[in-house]
């Protein structure tokens, strides 16, 4: 009996050991499968991230290409070309000065404006020492305000010189308005265009 019991005990121990070993093997197998699943999930995630990155770069490249195409389609802005000038003679210059003087003495803004080129620049000086540099619009806006107050404008001692298509006139101007008067040396530069002679520059050089 004692021997049978010993054999039985040994068998039981062996059986228990086999059960334990089987459990460990099953556990290891299950753990390995879980690791594989986790590794597969990581790979899928990396593929998805890479795909999103590529799509984002493709979209960016597409937008950049569209911007470049749009810019290439835009027409370059054309610079405004100055109007071509024509030869001018002393009689035409004298006629313009007469018209310029008359427009002021008759307080005619439209006639006065028609004598100036859009490329005009001018320098205005007053007896108080104020100096103002003006373009075409600024000059005409300033003159529009004062033209109605002018009493008389008289020119004398005209001196005309012509170089190329530009005439320069120097003369003495006596100017009188309701609230201001001065006398000084004025300079006008004049060019001939298809629609007539125009003043391109004006300056009261020296006040007397």
Image (cartoon, helix red, strand yellow):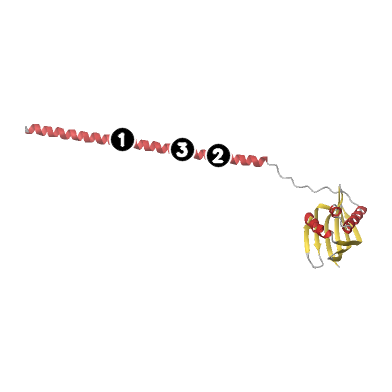
Question: Residue shown at 49%/37% (left/top)?
Answer: 51
Residue at the left extreme of this rendering: 1
Question: Residue shown at 43%/36% (left/top)?
Answer: 44
Rendered location of residue 176, percent (x, y): 87, 64
The label shown at residue 59 is 2
Above or below: residue 54 compared with residue 142? above
Q: Are marks 1 and 3 in contact (CB under 8 Å)?
A: no
The label shown at residue 60 is none
Quarter of the picture holding the C terminus: bottom right
Q: Earlier in the sequence, mark 1 or mark 3?
A: 1
Rendered location of residue 66, percent (x, y): 61, 39
Above or below: residue 201 compared with residue 13? below
Mark 3 is surrounded, within 10 Å at the Cα level, by few (under 14), some (14 to 19) or many (20 or more) other residues, namely: few
Count of labels shown? Answer: 3
Above or below: residue 46 compared with residue 107? above
Identify the secondary structure beneath mark 2.
helix
Residue at the spot of label 1: 30
Q: Earlier in the sequence, mark 1 or mark 2?
A: 1
The label shown at residue 48 is 3
Q: Is residue 73 left or right of residue 131?
A: left
Question: Residue shown at 91%/60% (left/top)?
Answer: 158
Q: CA distance from mark 1 to mark 2?
A: 43 Å
């Amino acid at each position: 009996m004692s021997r049978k019991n010993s054999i039985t005990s040994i068998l039981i121990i062996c059986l228990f050991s086999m059960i334990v070993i089987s459990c460990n093997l099953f556990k290891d197998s299950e753990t390995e499968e879980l690791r594989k699943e986790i590794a597969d999930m990581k790979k899928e995630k990396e593929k998805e991230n890479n795909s999103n990155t590529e799509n984002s770069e493709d979209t960016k490249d597409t937008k950049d290409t569209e911007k470049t195409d749009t810019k290439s389609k835009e027409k370059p802005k054309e610079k405004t070309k100055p109007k071509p000038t024509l030869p001018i003679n002393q009689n035409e210059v004298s006629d313009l000065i007469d018209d310029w003087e008359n427009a002021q003495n008759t307080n005619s803004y439209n006639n006065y404006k028609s004598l100036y080129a859009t490329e005009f620049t001018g320098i205005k000086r007053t007896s108080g020492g104020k100096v103002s540099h003006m373009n075409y619009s600024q000059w005409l806006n300033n003159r529009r305000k004062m033209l109605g107050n002018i009493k008389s404008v008289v020119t004398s001692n005209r001196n005309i010189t012509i170089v190329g298509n530009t005439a320069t006139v120097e003369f003495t101007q006596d100017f009188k308005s309701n609230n201001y008067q001065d006398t000084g040396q004025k300079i006008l530069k004049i060019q001939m265009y298809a629609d007539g002679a125009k003043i391109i520059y004006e300056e009261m050089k020296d006040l007397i």
